[in-house]
Image (tube, grey):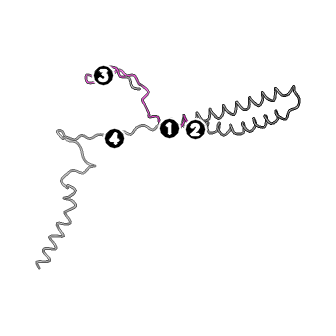
Amino acid sequence: MRRRVTALLVAGLASLAPDLAAGATAPAASSFAAEPGSPFEVVERVEPPQRSHRLFWTLGLGGAALVAASFPMARSADRRYDDYLSETDPSQLEARFQATRRMDRLASASLWTGEAMLVTAVWLRFVRTHRPADRVSLTVEPARCAVSFRF
């Protein structure tokens, strides 16, 4: 008989243990409201606004397209140079050479511009932090500076 009473007492204490460990006397977190005089205040979580990544995608895709387009242009410049080397008519030499230089410069410009656009896109998306549009503000409050400039 004594074992049964002891077992029931231990079972009862064990069933109350999670409530005691969790602090059953404290209010639930979902129904917590700061009362006047309480050392804690309820702070609402403010989610930052979602930024558009349209500029990132435009620069990234445009840069990738320019880099991809530079390779056929470079092959065309190489073909034009081969034509220049095999040309036997002296009157055509200058025109072929100028066409080769023009295509080579277009290929180089396309490659450099595309790479610059890709770097800018990566910087815009992953490195730059969002800053508010108003960098100079006038604030009239006793505890704040009158003019602030953020950069």
Which callout, 1 or 4, points to the residue nearer the camera? 1
Other-residue count near label 4 (Cα within 10 Å), few / some / many at <14 / 14–19 / ≥20: few
Q: Which residue is under mark 3?
A: 145
Asked if the residue under mark 3 is in contact with the one under mark 2, i.e. CB atoms within 8 Å, the reply is: no
**Mark 4 and mark 2: Cα distance apart in space:** 33 Å
**Residue 85 % position (x, y):** 82, 34
**Residue 53 % position (x, y):** 51, 38
- Report whether 90 appears left or right of 100: right
Q: Is residue 129 magenta?
A: yes
**Mark 1 and mark 4: Cα distance apart in space:** 24 Å
Residue type (three-letter) at the residue carrying disc 4? Arg
Other-residue count near label 1 (Cα within 10 Å), few / some / many at <14 / 14–19 / ≥20: some
Q: Which residue is under mark 1?
A: 125
Asked if the residue under mark 2 is in contact with the one under mark 1, i.e. CB atoms within 8 Å, the reply is: yes
Q: Is residue 103 magenta?
A: no
Q: Which residue is under mark 4?
A: 45
Residue type (three-letter) at the residue carrying disc 2? Gly
- Report whether 81 appears left or right of 45: right
**Residue 33 % position (x, y):** 24, 44
Position of residue 51 relative to residue 140, above or below, is: below
Q: Which residue is under mark 2?
A: 60
Q: Which range of residues does the magenta coloring cover? A: 119-148
Instruction: Give SS at disc 3.
Output: loop
Other-residue count near label 3 (Cα within 10 Å), few / some / many at <14 / 14–19 / ≥20: few
Quadrant of image for the C terminus = top left
